[in-house]
Amino acid sequence: MKALLALVRTDLRLYFSNRRALVISLVAPILIAGFFGATLGGNPGKRPARIPIAVVDLDKSEVTKAIVASMRKDDNFDLRDFELAPAVEQVRAGKIRAAVVLPKGFGEEAPRALFRPNAAKPEIEIHVDPSQAVTMALVKGLLAQHVMEEVARSAFGGGAIGMKFLADAKAAIEKSAELAPETKKDLAELLDRVERLRSRQSSGEASGGTGFSLKMPFQTKEREVTSGDRKYNPYAHSFAGMGVQFILFSGIDLGVAVLLMRRMGLWKRLRAAPVSRRLLLGSRVLSGMIVATAMMLGIYAAGIAIFGVRVDGSWPGLLLVIAAFGFLTSSFGLLIASVGRTPEATRGIAILATLLLVMLGGAWVPTFIFPEWLQSATLFVPTRWAVDGLEAMTWRGQGLETALPAVAAMLTFSVAFTAIAVACFRWEE
Amino acid sequence: MLEATDLWKSYGETAAVAGISLRVEPGQIVGLLGPNGAGKTTTVSMITGLTAPDRGSVHIDGMALGETANEAKRRLGLVPQEIALYEELGAGANLRLMGALYGIEGSLLDERVDAVLALVGLTDRAGDKPAKFSGGMKRRLNIACALVHDPDVLLLDEPTVGVDPQSRNAIFENLESLRDRGKALVYTTHYMEEAERLCDYIVIVDHGKVVASDTRENLLKLGTAPAVPKGPSLESVFLQLTGSALRDGR
């Protein structure tokens, strides 16, 4: 036991006495987690970034001007004014996400197309940055809302365009050979009622009443499902992910350190001492676990103090998850030491393996965006349990009982890694 | 004191050591000499318990040596060929760790650390890190680490590689002092003049076998034979016994 303590104490002393390396090991994950957290939404309560787009109005009609004005008021858009060619160039350069082109004649054709299925529909061109597929869907959705509202306002409103729209529509219905007589009659009645409505609206507007227009028939209200009523904090995910990534890197250092000790003859010296192999490897696992746990606690301390990460779940659960991940990290390091040959070659392969583990574990992007088969497959990736466990104990606000499966899974992986490492460890030089 | 009997070790089809026996008495320095690939390092590894022999046995004070913790290992000190030190730990801290691995603690550990630092002339550098030491100082501390638990048997695997003459001389004086205190030493080297100065008994191995094993004086007598034209030196005897062809280590 005294020999074990001496070895562990030495490892810890060596690790924590290298202050520069220690600061970098702590600062790097905190900075990168901070960056990821900011890009994923930043501080809770703050608005997401507005989408920079351009609307090129080639029509300059009352309708298109109203659409542009409506979009300008929309907080989702950062509307820029450009002519067509410069707007497309801005999209190509990545300065704006999309350029919406309202064609000439849009103001006349769009209301007409509302009630006449065979009428030619005006075409809105959207020049889009192909790397921004999600933005495209968002722009199309919001554009539909603004266009529908303004076209309907124009069609049913009291202006000259509305009157012309009704007159044209009635004439077209009358002349139509395709419509059944009953349908013609119903449509004519509908347009008459609309005309009466418009007349009342005109007199109502003149006397200060409220006008009529078509609006979206619903509103949405977002309710974030987190623990309690607190806002979701994206830093909670980024600190889990980056913490896992950088602590696993420290596992690589642990493994490579054993290989360096072998090269330096230190391992030979330790093995010549009257201590068991189990004690030698056990001391490495124990010191690695203590370092990994302490570092993760340090990273979370910064996340809590600086970035507002909250432990809304169980504190004991969080500590258990972190300790289990510490064991996982040190057993991973031992595995690296047992299968590696030279420190240089081993470091490269270990970094690749770590990045794969981290990526599949959902440390970079949440696992729910993975294909379904990959979501199932990543249950066999230990880092997935670490990230899920950390998130469950922080922003998901889960209790200790939710931490236990993650802890059990990580302990199982750790024991398996240790067993393989011990079996494969090259004791002879 | 140390008795290695009929040691055999093969790696695949290659026999690295084929029946080497060695005996070292208290107060004796035995030189283990041989060209590259002769089997010296494998022999030392088996004697220190780092490598299990395929056949044969090693006994220290009558106790069989095992690969793991046992009393025989406690009586053995190894000075590896490499400078096997924690470069970022102070000299004293390196010694304390080594002492703790051998079960020494408290005031006894303090005494032993002070004693070995004094022996190798590093008392005033106890708090300094080996990273700041010269090559000779590191070599001396390397030896001190093997002595802190006061072993009965000390194995030194080329302990003077890359050191200046002053440090080498200091190391020799340390080793001679240990011999005078009744320690048993096994010394492997490529430098014949070192073996000639230090060793009471010399074992020359080649191709995994002992080709000569005798006192220094008796081996030097071979130098007067007509087959050794360069005269009575250990180097000429060594070359006569092992040949002058270049060797590549295995």
Image (cartoon, rainbow, N blue to C red):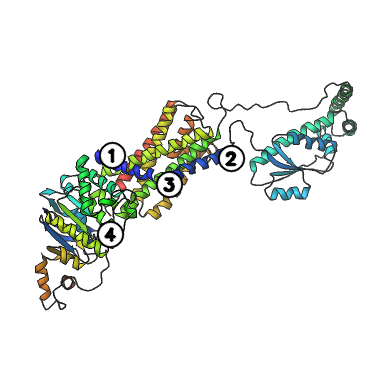
Query: Are the residues flagged by discs 2 and 1 in contact, CB closer than 8 Å?
Result: no
Chain hosting mark 4: B
Residue shown at 74%/33% (left/top)?
A145
Marks 2 and 3 sit apart, C-alpha to C-alpha, by 27 Å
Gap between marks 1 and 4 measured at Cα: 31 Å
Q: Which residue is mark 1?
A: A5
Q: Earlier in the sequence, mark 2 or mark 1?
A: 1
Label 2 and label 1 in one chain: yes
Instruction: Name the residue carrying label 4.
Output: B136
Query: Of residues B188 and A167, which is closer to you in this image?
Result: B188
Quadrant showing the C terminus of chain B: bottom left
The dot on residue A39 is 2
- Quick one: SS at disc 2? helix
Q: Residues within 10 Å of mark 2 (few under 14, many from 20)?
A: some
User: What number is the disc on residue A330?
Assistant: none
Q: Position of residue A279 (x, y in %)?
A: 26, 42
Q: Nearer the viewer, residue A296 or A345?
A: A296
The residue pinned by badge 3 equals A21
Q: Nearer the viewer, mark 1 or mark 4?
A: 4
